[in-house]
Image: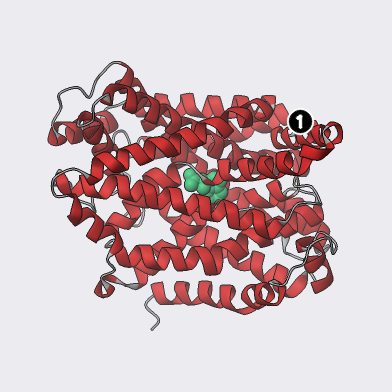
Amino acid sequence: MPYCSPFGAFIHHVTHFSMDLTNRDSFGSKFGVIAAAAGSAIGLGNIWRFPYVLGANGGGAFLLIYLIFVVVIGIPVMMSEFVIGRSAQRNPYGAFRILAPGRPWYLVGIMGVAAAFMILAFYAAVAGWTMEYLYQSVVNGFSGKSAEEMSTMFDTFRSGSARPVIWFLVFMVMTSCIVMAGIQKGIEKYTKVLMPVLLLLLIALSIRSLTLPGAGEGLVFLFKPDFSKITGKVVLEALGQAFFSLSIGMGTLITYGSYIQKKERLGNTAVSVSLTDTFIAVLAGVAIFPAVFAFSIDPASGEDLVFKTLPVIFQQMPGGYFFSLIFFLLLAVAALTSTISVLEVVVANFTEEFQFGRRKATVLAALAISVLGIFASGSWSWFKELDIFGFSVFELLDHTSANYMLPLGGFFIVVFVGWFMGKPKVSGELSSNGMFPVRYYPLFLFIVRFIAPIAIALVFLNSLGLF
Ligand code: TRP
C-alpha cells in the first residue's frame, strides 16, 4: 500500500517516473532516495544540537571523536538499517518480526518507538523556538540589539509563559498534517531546492563570522583538539550526537530502507547521506564559533547557544534582515522534514500493530507526544521546578534518547545484521543480488560484527567510569 505513507507515495512517484523515462530513472530515483534520507538527517541536529554539544564538551577533541564515530559506527549502522528495512519491506517493529519470527528482536523496534516519542517531544519544542525566531525576523525584532540584549531576549521568550508552548503545538500540527495527508511528494520537491539554499546561506554566514575581529579563536576552539578535555562524558556525547544527527538507532532509516528500490546501492547511499550531514554540521560550527568568541558568548552555555549567537551575526551583515528571515524559514523547513520522519516511525508502528487507520494513528501519536512536549517546552517556565535526577524534562529527554537509547538501538541493529541475518541475505541486499560488486563486504562484516558493537559497549562502560 504505497499511498498509505508519505514516503511510500514519494518513492512510488519515482518508480512510476522511471517507467516513463528509462534513461533518467537511475538519477531521478537515486537522488530521490538521498533527498528523503538527507531530509531526515539534516535538521536542528546539525545547526542547533551539534554546536551546542560541541561547545559544552570542549571543542576540537569532541569534533575529532565525532568524525571517527560517524565513519566507524555511523555509516555501518546506517547501512545496516537500510539492509534490514529493504529486505523486510516493513517498518522497524514489523521488520524484526519478519526477519526473526518468535524472537525478542522486535523489542528493538519498540524501543525505537519510545525514542521517537521522546525525541519528537523536545525536538519540536526547539523547532518552536525557530518559529519564534522566524517571527522575530519578520517583525524586525532583532534590530539594533547587542549580543547581551539578544541573549536576554531569548531567555525572556523561553521563560515566558505560553509562547514557547504555543509555537511547539503549531509545529506539531504542521508535522501531523503532513504525515497524515501524505503530501511528502510535494515536500520533497521543495526540499531538493531549499536544502541547497540553506547550504549557501550557511556559507554566507561562515564568511561573515570568519571575518569578525577575534574569529581565529573560534576556529582554534573548533578544530584544535585539546586531548586533556576528553572524558567518558565527552566520548558518550560525541557518540550520541553522531547517532542523533544521522537519524540512526531508532528505525527511521529502516522505514526509509523499505522504500528504496532494489536496484539502488545501499552502501553508496549511506555514505553520501552521512558525509553530507557531517559537512553541514561542521559548516554550522564554522559559522557559529568564530562569532561566539568574537561576541564573548560562552561556548558551553548549552541549548541556547545558537539562538543567542545567530541573530547577532545577522545584525552584523549587510542585508541581515533578509538573511535572517530566509535562514530561520529554511531552518524550520529542515526541522519539519526531520520531524516528519520521526513521527512516521510511530505512525507506521501504530498502524501495523494496532490496525489503526493512518489518520487515527497520527492524531493519537501527536496528542500523546504533545503532552510530553508541553513539559519539555515549558521546562524554563511552568515546569522550571520539576527536577528529575538533576535534569529538567527537556534535558532528560534530549540526553537519554540521544546518548543512551539511540546507541543501544544501534548496537542491536549491527549485531542483528552481523550475527543473525545471515551472510547471503546481507550481501545480497548490499549488492542488489549481485548487480554491484561489494568489495567492501568483508570490511563491513568485520565492522558490524566486532568493531561497532564493541566500540558502543566500551563507550557505555567508559561513561559509567568503569575504567
Ligand atoms: N537527524 C535529525 C537532525 O539532525 C533529527 C532526526 C530525525 C532524528 N530522525 C531521527 C534523530 C531519528 C534520531 C533518530 O535534526
The residue carrying pointer 1 sits among few (fewer than 14), some (14 to 19) or many (20 or more) residues within 10 Å by Cα, namely some
Measuring from the top left, give residue 149's x and y in whole percent.
14, 31
Measuring from the top left, give residue 196's x and y in whole percent.
50, 36
Quarter residue 74 falls in: bottom right
Measuring from the top left, give residue 218's x and y in whole percent.
22, 54
Q: Residue at x 66, y 30 (%)?
A: 184
Q: Residue at x 23, y 30 (%)?
A: 317
Q: Secondary structure at mark 1?
A: loop
Tell whether circle 1 marks a residue whose Cβ is less than 8 angstroms from ligand 1. Answer: no
Quarter residue 173 falls in: top right
Q: Please name the amino acid that badge 1 sits on.
A: Gly
| Residue 421 as seen in the image, left or right of residue 142 | right
Measuring from the top left, give residue 419's x and y in whole percent.
73, 75
Along the line of sight, the residue nearer the viewer: 249 or 356: 249
Quarter residue 176 falls in: top right
| Residue 188 as seen in the image, left or right of residue 236 | right
